[in-house]
Amino acid sequence: MLIAEQKRKESISEYIIFMYQTEDLIRAYNFNLEEIYKYVIQHFPVEDGMKTRIKAWYRKVANQMKKESIMKSGHLEELNQLAIELSNFNLELLKSDQTYRKIFDQAKLHINRNSALSNGQLTNPVQICLNGIYGLLILRLNGKPVDDNIKQGAQAFGDVLSYLSFKYQKRNNGH
């Protein structure tokens, strides 16, 4: 099973963040699948048949990105739709689940701060949490220092997304 498929089954928010990373990786290599294979896939500790499947998956994602005209920036429509679905589920849980309400309230300060930092371009709290976690990942990948505010925000965002994803998977698997 490919990593993306596994993440989608286990945690929808991890899947979305993984796909953001995949989009950026494809862009970083200018959609050159041979280079992605040489510098990325070739180093995966899996047999050659699986590497071929992984390359085919990257090709599929790259082709979809081209089709949706998001070569420079933006996210796949599937990911945007999943984020909207999670946002709607977030609203449901805020009304019906006291545990979630408490977790969300603890993240509210960080959500509001990140919304303000985006000059109001980001208002969706779930998207803010996804972007916050992804932003932390990018900082760490680039070896940048991470201050305590960012760490605290990321922890709060992670708590929101973990609970939200758990409930989402539970609901969608009929439990």
Image (cartoon, rainbow, N blue to C red):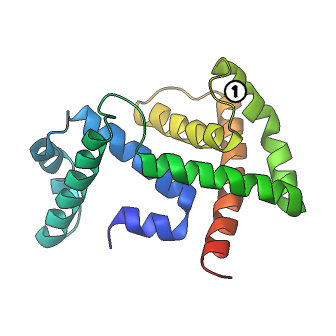
Nearest the viewer among 40 and 144 is 40
> At which x and y percent is residue 140?
47, 35
Callout 1: 10 Å neighbours few (<14), some, many (20+)? some
Q: Which one is in front, 126 or 25?
A: 126
**Residue 98, located in which quarter of the rendered image?**
bottom right
Give residue 148's position: percent from left, percent from top: 69, 30
Q: Amino acid at mark 1?
A: Ser
Residue appearing at x 65%, y 31% in the figure = 150
Q: Name the residue at 40% across, 45% down.
A: 76
Residue plotted at (49% across, 71% down): 9
Q: Nearer the viewer, residue 28 or 57?
A: 57
Quadrant holding the C terminus:
bottom right
Left or right, residue 61 beside residue 173: left
Which residue is drawn at the image coordinates 38% and 30% (left, top)? 73
Q: Is residue 7 left or right of residue 42?
A: right
Image quarter of the N terminus: bottom left
Residue 40 is situated, as x and y percent measured from the top left of the image, at: 21, 48
How many tags in the picture? Answer: 1
